[in-house]
């Protein structure tokens, strides 16, 4: 029996495992980097052991240090979570060699599936359907488009889609470099890229007594940069025939490697309905909660039981209802999914963990590794929380999840919350017509500015005024939109300037700055016309009558950062200073770091004096487990290069300078 468990991971998954351990009476041990010293998973554990350093290579990827930590803390078992060392056979062996219980599959099974190329060979022998491999060196136009994939690891790292033969060599080098950086293995292989395919997977659970469960399907097709955003179970629109084929193939794959514990077999479904094996993840998946909610199981508890030698019942429980999960990321979808960092002031989900009023009512679950006041850093994944809803039907689950996200209080760095809300309401999603290319086709429409932002700016300005007023409220029954003569108080949030002043008859206010989004997606939230009356205003709550409808705005200010939550949208506003500040300006052609991160590599041969072309990738930054390209702003000459591989940079740091070719010609002509 397991008495004390160390989780060789961090954040949300560590907190998730600890939750089950507490329910089962198992003591918990956390490990943490210096950057995570105050993290939620550390605070929730019974004991914690420091892993000196901040970057994963020095901390969560040091299996030797983690085994020592388990022994020092008196743990008798290790759970790897997901990511980091969760699919590392040598780490599993080290845990077992130290006399500890490994809560995962046998090292041999991990090893068999660690290389996607080897795994495909095993699956072919087991009769599992596969995509035929393509040799990039002999590929022809008939083989296009190609998908290049890293043989080791996952999460979209080392993956490229190639649509032109001329790009194969360059993309192979880039994919190999990214794979080597992320996984220490630069092997890359190629296979046909299936356009408009669906990513469907099967959760499996196996014990040491010959029982294998196939726990339904999950659809994970809604992805950005080959990383999942929204998942659901069961996969919608799959007939019983193809569903049975997937379950049988997953069980065959599981038995082929002598698997034990929880795992996932992933498939690609072509538009014609043909399934192809992608890979087997020899660990718990991020999206496991949707399976738990549909089957009424605790997969972590079952992992622990299997590790203790328990036998599973012959058959799993029957599935009921539908579950959908949305991954709330600290990122900006409109800026190439750039990760966002900073202080998380508030993370609240109304209805979280409340008992439903009826057995069939939707229920909300939130899995997170953060709480109010925590800092979101640059070293790890940008995942803030997983928001999961179960309901009797898919339509109810989608609606309830959209409502929960809309009503959440997420105060701090920018997130993908609005993208999730709009995605869950998109006709292609609600009608089950989506595939892995959904965001490529619809992203522009999904990231248009949130309608009603100028009303949020008005609410923020009035709340600020109320906070500065004796008694904390402004006069009731305020005036509406009108021209305001001087003198007036002014507050500016982004492009919106709000002017207001007290009068004998009450209070008058006006705002400049167009939303550019009043006719955009989201019009179903209500008419946000120009007929506005200010009903009431306090430091934290403002009521406006908009188009004849009274809307309430909850306002919280954290210095110059203001968050406004309402039924028509959530807004993150930055108050601008009244007078612009003068200071250092970067020279024309500057390449500035779009986010804090680490310089991982430079374009081959890049040096001062190199001629570059507009749009050419020059520098690669890594932040929160994702790579981001910094490209040349114009054609010209690289006249300064400050980026050095391995160096940490802050947002806005000067990486390089490209002197525009035309400007350079003018300078040369004017030289004596």
Image: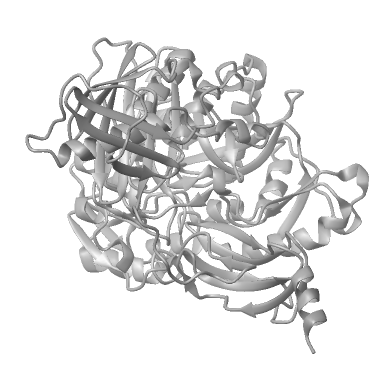
Q: 528 above or below 78?
A: above
Looking at the image, residue 613 sits to the left or right of residue 252; the answer is right
Q: Residue at x 73, y 35 (%)?
A: 129
Looking at the image, residue 369 sits to the left or right of residue 652; the answer is left
User: Residue most toward the bottom?
Assistant: 672
User: Residue most toward the left?
Assistant: 471
Q: 265 above or below 71?
A: above
In this orientation, does residue 212 appear? Answer: no
Q: Residue at x 92, y 46 (%)?
A: 141
Q: Relative to the observer, which residue lies in front, 243 or 248?
A: 243
Give the mark count: 0
Q: Position of residue 301 (x, y in %)?
A: 31, 38
In this orientation, does residue 87 appear? Answer: yes
Q: 146 above or below 569?
A: below
Q: Position of residue 204 (x, y in %)?
A: 50, 34
Q: Quadrant of residue 556?
A: top left
Q: Position of residue 226 (x, y in %)?
A: 61, 44
Q: Residue at x 28, y 11 (%)?
A: 359
Q: Quadrant of residue 293?
A: top left
Looking at the image, residue 466 sits to the left or right of residue 278; the answer is left
């Amino acid at each position: 029996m397991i008495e004390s468990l160390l989780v060789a991971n961090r954040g949300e998954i560590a907190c998730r495992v600890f939750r089950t351990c507490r329910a089962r009476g198992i003591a918990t041990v956390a490990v943490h980097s210096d950057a995570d010293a105050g993290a939620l998973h550390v605070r929730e554990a019974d004991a914690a052991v420091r892993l000196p350093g901040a970057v994963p290579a020095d901390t969560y990827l040091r299996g030797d240090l983690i085994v020592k930590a388990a022994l020092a803390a008196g743990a008798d078992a290790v759970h790897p979570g997901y990511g980091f060392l969760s699919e590392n056979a040598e780490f599993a062996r080290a845990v077992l060699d130290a006399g500890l219980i490994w809560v995962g599959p046998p090292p041999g099974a991990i090893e068999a599936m660690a290389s996607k190329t080897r795994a495909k060979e095993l699956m072919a022998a087991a009769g599992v359907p596969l995509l035929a491999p393509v040799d990039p060196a002999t590929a022809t136009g008939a083989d296009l488009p190609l998908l290049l994939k890293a043989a080791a690891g996952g999460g979209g790292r080392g993956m490229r889609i190639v649509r032109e033969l001329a790009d194969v060599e360059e993309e192979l080098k880039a994919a190999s470099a990214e794979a080597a950086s992320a996984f220490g293995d630069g092997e890359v292989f190629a296979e046909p890229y299936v356009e408009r395919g669906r990513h469907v997977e099967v959760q499996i659970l196996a014990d040491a007594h010959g029982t294998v469960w196939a726990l339904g399907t999950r659809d994970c097709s809604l992805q950005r940069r080959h990383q999942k955003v929204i998942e659901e179970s069961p996969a919608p629109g799959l007939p019983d025939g193809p569903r049975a084929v997937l379950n049988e193939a997953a069980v065959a794959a599981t038995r082929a490697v002598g698997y034990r514990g929880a795992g996932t077999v992933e498939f690609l479904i072509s538009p014609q309905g043909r399934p192809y094996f992608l890979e087997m993840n020899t660990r718990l998946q991020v999206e496991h909660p949707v399976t738990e909610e549909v089957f009424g199981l605790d997969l972590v508890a079952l992992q622990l039981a299997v590790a203790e030698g328990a036998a599973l019942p012959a058959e799993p429980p029957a599935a009921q209802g539908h579950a959908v999960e949305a991954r709330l990321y600290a990122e900006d979808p409109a800026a190439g999914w750039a990760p966002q960092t900073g202080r998380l002031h508030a993370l609240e989900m109304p209805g979280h963990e409340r008992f439903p009023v009826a057995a069939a009512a939707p229920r909300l679950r939130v899995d997170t590794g953060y709480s109010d006041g925590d800092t979101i850093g640059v070293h790890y994944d940008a995942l803030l929380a997983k928001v999961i809803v179960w309901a009797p039907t898919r339509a109810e689950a989608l609606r309830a999840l959209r409502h929960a996200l809309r009503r959440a209080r997420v105060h701090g760095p920018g997130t993908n919350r609005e993208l999730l809300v709009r995605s869950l309401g998109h006709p292609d999603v609600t009608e089950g017509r989506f595939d892995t290319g959904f965001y490529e086709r619809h992203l522009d429409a999904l990231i248009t500015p949130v309608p009603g932002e100028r009303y949020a700016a008005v609410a923020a300005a009035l709340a600020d005024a109320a906070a500065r007023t004796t008694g904390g409220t402004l006069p009731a029954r305020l005036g509406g939109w009108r021209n305001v003569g001087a003198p007036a108080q002014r507050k500016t949030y982004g492009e919106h300037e709000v002017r207001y002043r007290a009068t004998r008859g009450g209070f008058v206010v006006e705002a400049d700055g167009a939303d550019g989004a009043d006719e955009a997606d989201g019009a179903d939230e209500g008419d946000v016309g120009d007929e506005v009356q200010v009903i009431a205003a306090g430091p934290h709550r403002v009521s406006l009558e908009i188009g004849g409808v009274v809307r309430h705005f909850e306002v919280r200010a954290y210095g110059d950062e203001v968050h406004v939550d309402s039924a028509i949208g959530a807004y993150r506003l930055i108050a601008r200073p009244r007078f612009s500040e003068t200071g250092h300006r970067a020279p024309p052609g500057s390449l500035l770091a779009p986010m804090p991160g680490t310089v991982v590599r430079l374009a081959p041969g890049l040096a001062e004096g190199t001629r570059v072309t507009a749009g050419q990738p020059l520098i690669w930054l890594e932040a929160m487990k994702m790579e981001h390209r910094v490209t040349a702003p114009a054609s010209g000459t690289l006249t300064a290069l400050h980026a050095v591989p391995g160096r940490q940079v802050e947002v806005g740091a000067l990486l390089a300078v490209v002197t525009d070719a035309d400007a350079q010609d003018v300078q040369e002509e004017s030289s004596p």
